[in-house]
Image (cartoon, grey):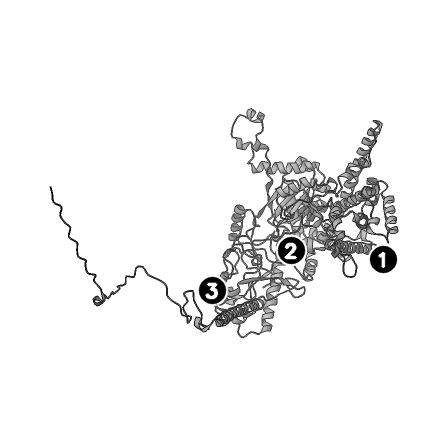
Amino acid sequence: MAVDEFGREIPGARGGGRRSPSPHRHHQHREGSGGGGGSALPTHLNDSLPTSRYEERGVGGGDRDHYRDRDRDRGGDDRSSSRKRKTRSRSPPPTSSRRGGDRGSDGGGGNDRSNNYKKSNNKPHPSTVYVEEPMLCQFLWKEANEEKTEEDYDEYRKSYCLNYVRTFFNEHMDDSWFRFMYSPLERYQVAQQEKNRAAEESKEFAQELESSLSKTISSSSTTTNNGSSSSSSSDASFFVLKSRLGGGIRQTGKPEYHHHSSPTKSSRQSLVNPIPATHVLALTNQVLPIREVPHFVTDEQLTVALMQQVSSKTSKAMDPNSMILYSGPPAADLTRTAYLQATDEVRKEIIQTLNHSEKGGGIAKGGSGSGSAGASHVPRKEDTFVPKTLELTVECSDAYGRLEVDADGKGGEPEERGGVPSRKASVWVSTKPINPHVQVLSAALSSKKRIQEDQAAAFKLAKAYDRKRDIPSESRLENLLPKAVPNIMATVAEAAAAAKGNEGSSSEAAAAPDDSLSSQDLEDALDVTIAYLRRVHLFSYYKGCQAAPRVADVLNGNHAASTIYFRLANADELLEPTKDVPDMEMGDGVPKIDLLVQRLKDSIQSALQESEKWDSDDNDESSLPTTCIFVNEEIDREAKDIEYQQSQVEDGWIEDHATVDGDGRARCAFHFCRKLFKDSSFLKKHLIKKHSEFLRAEMAKCHDSYMMKAWDSQEKRPVPPILVDCGHGFGVQPSPVLGAAVPLVADPEPELWRREEERRDFEEKEAEARRERHAAASLDQPLSEGRGHIHDNNNNRGGERVNTFVDVDDMKEEKVEIAFDKIEIPVEPLKKKRKKKKLL
């Protein structure tokens, strides 16, 4: 098998060669496989993604027709369908007991390995996409290779796992989610995109505050002119009022978790605790969710498919930078959710176009009626109805031009013309609005005694994140908070001084009264700070004090920052009775601390330490300031190297695909183009505009060495567990692949066998204990009642079983003997004579 520049085995071509066969396959299985160029049916390993960029690109006609028919009928990936295994299992035949012959059975096998799978599970395991059959456990492998040693089995296990990891890398190296994780340039661009989003969100935050303040000033001036006095609560702007989190109401009944709650439950929770508008991201109302995006569909292909739904007039008028696609992390099945940020006009036009295409054109549906009557009729309900999801077809045949043929690298024609099989996938555009989840904190976390401490910590974290992400000074929290809550700095200073003065007094004296103005100002400052942290920095204060890496994680609900946490309204009242409980103090007199409070305290402490580390790095002259670092110094440096290599590749590729005639005119070198231009500058524009797919293939190779380096250094890779065949008794068991330099999988069969022996020993001991208890109970009886014997329900002794079954159909003759000598016949008494009456 061919080997690439990293020493990795190259999978076979899509036309018919097999991809990454298992190391333990016999030679006789390989002989009949037929590694030809197109006659064999495509397997799951060949139809998932464009294959590795290092392999040959021959595509057979039979495979091409098969792919075209399958993709037209299904419109997507074919991995969900089951497939038959081509090899027989080496698992031992089933026996009643493993001790009686499981380990001692012949190694010939004869049973199909599919018998080891559960019959009810029709969906194949994800690992079957990358390997053709499960790995054998040590017992089965030694049974088939009796002359081999344990070192040979370790080599087999290493080879199997390494081949599995390499196949996964080659399969997904061009996927967007994979490149976001391992390509330094892609990681750098995602971090830069997130930094720009944070700056835009801070501007939106500042504009909303200024707009609310202007409305509050105008309304207060109108009220003053009318002669009425305004209270302190009415002086607060609408922006501050919509940021308050202190009125949370906990519903009685079963707890509802937002990850598994239905839309009905979420709506009920929103009615009880309305979503505070100040905490909602401005991006929430500007994005269009696209769900169930397959892994082989790149962000560029998805963006092109969405732009095709927009009219040419709208696309020319829109700003190219106003359309941004945020891609979320992959799920267990490697599908993801993407979010398109665009203007209202663009989003509405995309929804209308998709809705119109699903209905079949609307006008063509109506038949050949009168045009004037059809145009003037009132729209029906089905004409204006928009479903919750709309199907969008994405063309994803060749992500990076891997299968496009450039025979000699200079536009030459190949010996055999072959096209790229067409491939399309269906994604679902959601028309439902995105609403954040709402949850109420516990009473211990909602206590007003924590307001001052939490406000100081949250404000310090916000200042550190603003400096790190280089937020504009006019949009930073330290400049916005005094506008939202006037005199907040003086209130914070007074509260800190009061807390320091009451350091030796009780906690009741240290806490400010709830109805005071300073207490409400501190609470408003805390709520505005938490809203700023969530919207600008995707930071969750009450849940772990951690920031989400991407905004798609928050929109998708995969991060703690996707939930808005309310403080319980009557928290102090609920905590009040606990003062009289004597168990609230430890043996040494130290009061107990709630577990949730201690966990939040530790999270705040670790977040503050990390922010202090950023300040120390800024003061260090040997390192770059944090404002210039997007990911880290090493990743940023590698990203710059890749950008330089791509620029060099572009210049060389243009020179290789340009021919200059004697008169100075330039001609395109591609055999199917051959266009002539005035000079090389016009030809350069033509190559980049018309043949960019070939350039992308060359530029993508600049990422490979860095991605492979990051992949090999990772201890836990995002690969599915390997299936290990543990015989008929235990079946096929999943086992994770771990290890950076040498990926390995643990053999689960010894542990399973140990548990089975423990279970059998436990059952035997239980049976022996039951027999002893019955014997002891029988010995306690007297001899007249049959001591030492087991009695049954019919009081039979000796432990013998009595047959009480009666067959009604079995007729039996019963003999009856009569002894006449013992029969006494009674003597009949004499009858009395009656006198006859004479007749007169």
Mark 2–mark 1 CB contact (< 8 Å): no
> Which label number is shown at residue 620?
1
Q: Tag 1: residue type?
A: Asp
Q: Nearer the viewer, mark 2 or mark 3?
A: 3
> Residue 435, relative to residue 599: is it above or below?
above
Q: State which quadrant residue 735 falls in.
A: bottom right
Cα distance in 3D space between marks 3 and 1: 68 Å
- In terms of depth relative to the viewer, which is nearer, 294 or 807? 807
Crowdedness of circle 2 by 10 Å Cα count: few (<14), some, many (20+)? many
Which of the marked residues, 2 or 3, is nearer the chain's N terminus? 3
Which mark identifies residue 111? Answer: 3
CA gap between label 2 and label 1 equals: 38 Å
| Direction from residue 525 to residue 748 in the image, left or right | left
Q: Position of residue 83 (x, y in %)?
A: 51, 56
For label 1, count other residues whose C-alpha is less than 10 Å away and answer few (under 14), some (14-19) or many (20+).
few
For the residues marked 2 and 3, what is the alpha-carbon distance in whole angstroms? 37 Å
Q: Which of the 4 quarters of the picture holds residue 489?
A: top right
In the image, residue 655 lies at what x, y percent?
70, 52
Q: Nearer the viewer, mark 2 or mark 1?
A: 1
* Circle 2 residue: 173
Q: Residues within 10 Å of mark 3 (few under 14, many from 20)?
A: some
Mark 2: amino acid: Met
Given the image, on which type of amino acid does mark 3 rest?
Asn
